[in-house]
Image: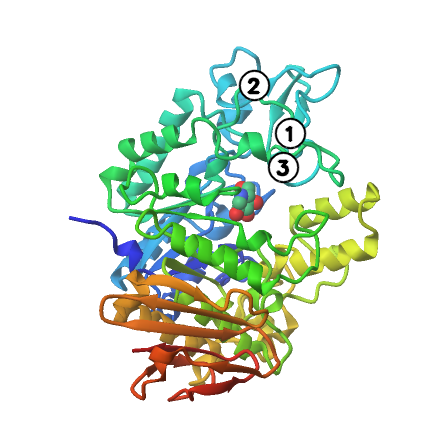
């Protein structure tokens, strides 16, 4: 039997810390998620991707795991987890776990042992090197600022951490490490989970000899990415993982693959099923970067965005499978980024962006609050931020003089990951209905206007629009399987594409501007019986020559 339910599915990502707090400690938890399963059922999603819920000292909010087989106390117990899983399954919702195995926490037993002595049985679980001329073994920088190496007093050697110093990288070249990871994955599969989202999985295999990375002008350290992404053994290890674990269960797998090209993705997510089902690529998320890497407030160019999205649509077709996303817990809110979050245009542009993405081929991901059109938050000072990435980057860029303080504050306000991590806005009551206690991070004050309760009460809300898009994908096979073609590639205002199957054709038109834009329907869609599948202005027919309203979007079918 072909197990490809994930091709028809829509995934909803939950960042548990910020979703729903059931016990008033200011931190979201597992029972809080269980309480909201009916809300998710109403939205119509098929799968939950759960950001990490494992035991963790929370240096990086759970992406630093100290025990893969225990639940973080703040989030609840294993019994709570099992109840959530079975209640989700009762509602036909599957649960995909975050698998963070490029690194562990430095408080994981393996690392505690590993750092004890050079001869400890766990020594080779991590990547230890001697210093070079009293300095780090190579010039690699960490993704969270500073060098990617920390010196350890007990054995006078350095260990590698591509993220924070509390996230030491596992040594995947050690077969014992791989065995342990597969055993742990198998344990979760036997519990009945439905898949894995694999954190920075493209980084598990490092280049032989760990050579220095290229040094950009604005960088204090070398860039490890050419030597730490899509490395020499990554496909071998994933194929092994597939043989040893994944192929024994009916799972959905998605690999987070920084630096992945379409050619590489064709290997990771090949339809022959030897590795993963799909990858998260980052090309579209990198288009508004500036001189200081992601720290910029540049606006994306629409022709570039279309070129990138279209490349992935066409080049994976019938070779591999796409994941479709605008948002996750690492990205700012899309309506504040590619849309327009001013009150007059917020809902229109949120719906337009949703139309643009959800009519493409691939598995769509919705990040909590995206279905309400939640926006970036008005953080004021550095004290308002919680995220290690933003705080470290601010200090590093400002102290080194690469970016001045006021520009850097603007950049972290615009691009910081905390924008995605403010509490889910459930209603207009205390703390947006998220918690009866003091939330661990500020609540976006716009919850009075933007909240789930209000949107559920209104037929034309962003929530109801997402619900429609999800239903359409279930009803119209062409959205899952049609071929994709981009029209008007050079337009600075319109994103227009078609989807084609043997019997039908879809036209998707999205305006990325507040200006009125004239648009003539392509000849074949001028027939009177073209059906309007979706329209963010509730049109029931489209004129041959139409002037598109601000952020207008529609989908037509013949
Ligand atoms: C990617 C995750 O999405 C991000 O949140 C985390 O900080 C890094 N990987 C390190 O695990």
Image coords of residue 517 (percent x, y)? 56, 81
- Residue under label 3, please give it: 164
Can residue 78 be seen in the rendering of this structure?
yes
- What SS does tag 3 mark? loop
Q: Disc 3 to disc 1, how far (Cα)?
A: 18 Å
**Which-is-in-front pick, marks 2 and 3?**
2
- Residue under label 2, please give it: 209
Bin the neighbour count of mark 2 within 10 Å (Cα to Cα): few under 14, some 14-19, many 20 and up: few
Residue 498 lies in quadrant:
bottom left
For image coordinates 36% across by 60% down, the residue present is 361
Image coords of residue 400 (percent x, y)? 82, 41
Q: How many marks?
A: 3
**Which-is-in-front pick, marks 3 and 1?**
1
Image coords of residue 174 (percent x, y)? 43, 20
Q: Is residue 147 left or right of residue 403?
A: left
Please report whichever mark, 2 or 3, sits nearer to the chain's N-terminal start: 3
């Amino acid at each position: 039997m072909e197990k490809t339910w994930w091709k028809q599915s829509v995934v909803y990502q939950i960042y548990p810390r910020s979703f729903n707090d059931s016990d008033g400690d200011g931190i979201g938890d597992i029972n809080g998620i269980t309480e909201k399963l009916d809300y998710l059922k109403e939205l119509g999603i098929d799968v939950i991707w759960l950001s990490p819920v494992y035991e963790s000292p929370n240096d990086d909010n759970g992406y630093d795991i100290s025990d893969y087989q225990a639940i973080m106390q703040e989030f609840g117990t294993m019994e709570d987890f099992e109840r959530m899983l079975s209640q989700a399954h009762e509602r036909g919702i599957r649960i995909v776990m975050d698998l963070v195995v490029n690194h562990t926490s430095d408080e994981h037993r393996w690392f505690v042992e590993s750092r004890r002595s050079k001869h400890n049985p766990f020594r080779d679980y991590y990547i230890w090197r001697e210093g070079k001329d009293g300095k780090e073994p190579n010039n690699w920088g960490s993704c969270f600022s500073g060098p990617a190496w920390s010196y350890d007093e007990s054995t006078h050697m350095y260990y590698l951490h591509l993220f924070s110093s509390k996230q030491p990288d596992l040594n995947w070249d050690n077969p014992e490490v791989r065995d342990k990871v597969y055993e742990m994955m198998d344990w979760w599969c036997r519990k009945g989970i439905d898949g894995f989202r694999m954190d920075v999985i493209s980084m598990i295999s490092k280049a032989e000899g760990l050579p220095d990375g290229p040094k950009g002008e604005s960088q204090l350290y070398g860039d490890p990415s050419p030597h730490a992404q899509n490395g020499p053994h990554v496909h071998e290890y994933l194929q092994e993982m597939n043989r040893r674990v994944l192929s024994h269960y009916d799972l959905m797998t998605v690999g987070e693959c920084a630096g992945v090209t379409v050619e590489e993705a064709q290997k990771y997510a090949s339809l022959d099923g030897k590795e993963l089902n799909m990858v998260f690529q980052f090309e579209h998320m990198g288009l508004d970067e500036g001189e200081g890497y992601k720290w910029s407030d540049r606006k994306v160019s629409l022709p570039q965005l279309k070129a990138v999205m279209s490349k992935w649509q066409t080049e994976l077709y019938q070779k591999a499978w796409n994941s479709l996303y605008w948002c996750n817990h690492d990205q700012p809110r899309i309506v504040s980024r590619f849309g327009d979050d001013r009150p007059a245009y917020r809902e229109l542009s949120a719906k337009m962006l949703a139309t643009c993405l959800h009519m493409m081929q691939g598995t769509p991901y919705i990040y909590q609050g995206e279905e309400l059109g939640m926006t970036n938050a008005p953080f004021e000072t550095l004290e308002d931020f919680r995220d290690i990435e933003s705080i470290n980057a601010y200090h590093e860029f400002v102290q080194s003089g690469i970016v001045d303080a006021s520009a850097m504050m603007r950049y972290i306000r615009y691009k910081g990951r905390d924008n995605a991590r403010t509490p889910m806005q459930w209603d207009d009551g205390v703390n947006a209905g998220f918690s009866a206690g003091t939330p661990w991070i500020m609540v976006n004050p716009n919850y009075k206007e933007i909240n789930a309760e209000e949107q559920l009460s209104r037929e034309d809300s962003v929530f109801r629009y997402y619900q429609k898009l999800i239903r359409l994908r279930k009803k119209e096979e062409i959205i899952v399987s049609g071929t994709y073609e981009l029209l008007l590639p050079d337009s600075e205002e319109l994103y227009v594409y078609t989807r084609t199957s043997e019997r039908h054709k879809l036209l998707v038109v999205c305006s990325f501007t507040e200006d009125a834009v004239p648009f003539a329907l392509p000849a074949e869609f001028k027939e009177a019986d073209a059906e309007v599948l979706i329209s963010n202005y509730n049109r029931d027919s489209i004129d041959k020559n139409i002037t598109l309203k601000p952020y207008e979007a529609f989908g037509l079918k013949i």
